[in-house]
Amino acid sequence: MRKVNVLCITLTSPIKIGIYEQNKLIETLESQEKSSDVLPLIFKDILKKYNVEKLFYANGPGSFMAIKVAYIFLKSLSILKKIPLFATDAFYFNKNQPIKAIGKLYFVKMNQDIKTQKLQIAPEANFTLPEVLDYNEFSTNTTPLYMIGAVG
């Protein structure tokens, strides 16, 4: 069985899952379904086909529910299967573009700080799976980034 790493971006629809062998993207999976419904099915197939060595995911900011579902699912899988879990913020996957928060508020990353900012017009935050996975961008701190404070 091929040894791979799996990356999940579940912040918006479609969810995107990348299979990486020696840091290079070898397979891409996408689904318009809810991550809570489809992640178990996708991983059932992945675990039959591959020997998963590491799990990676975007831990926010983005949809609170999508982040929670991904974190709980991946953390459980990590513990049960003894597969290390790593995370990085969503800006790594969208070329540092603003990410919709609520109303006209968007998450923006300046230097290493993530803040909310009102924007009248913001570019579409398209998330993409990198062709080559840079492990240095990820951390063992996998706690979700719940970033919204008081909205005024």
Image (tube, grey):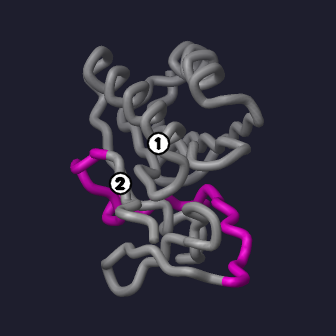
Question: Vertical placement of 126 versus 52: above or below?
Answer: below
Which label's residue is closer to the chain start, 1 or 2?
A: 1
Residue 37 drawn above or below residue 101: above
Residue at mark 2: 145
Label drawn at residue 67 = 1
| Rendered residue at 66%/41% (across/down) | 15
Predominant SS of the magenta segment: loop
Q: Return the x and y of residue 91 as percentages of the image width and height.
A: 49, 68
Measured as percent of width and height from the top left, residue 82 is found at 26, 22
Q: Left of 39 or right of it: where is 142?
A: left
* Callout 2 amino acid: Leu
Quarter of the rendering containing residue 3:
top left
Tell me which residue sits at (22%, 50%) in the image.
Answer: 141
Sort mark 1 into few (<14), some (14-19) or many (20+) by Cα contacts within 10 Å: many
Question: Could you tell me how many numbered marks the image carries?
Answer: 2
| Element type where label 1 sits in the image | helix
Q: Which residue lies furthest to the front in this view?
A: 152
Magenta residues (range): 120-143
Check whether the beta carbons of the residues at disc 1 and disc 2 lie within 8 A of each other. Answer: yes
Q: Is mark 2 on a helix, strand or loop?
A: loop
**Disc 1 residue type?**
Ile
Q: Position of residue 50 (x, y in %)?
A: 52, 24
Identity of the residue drawn at 34% across and 86% down: 111
In the image, is 71 to the left or to the right of 20? left
- Point out the residue furthest to the left here: 141
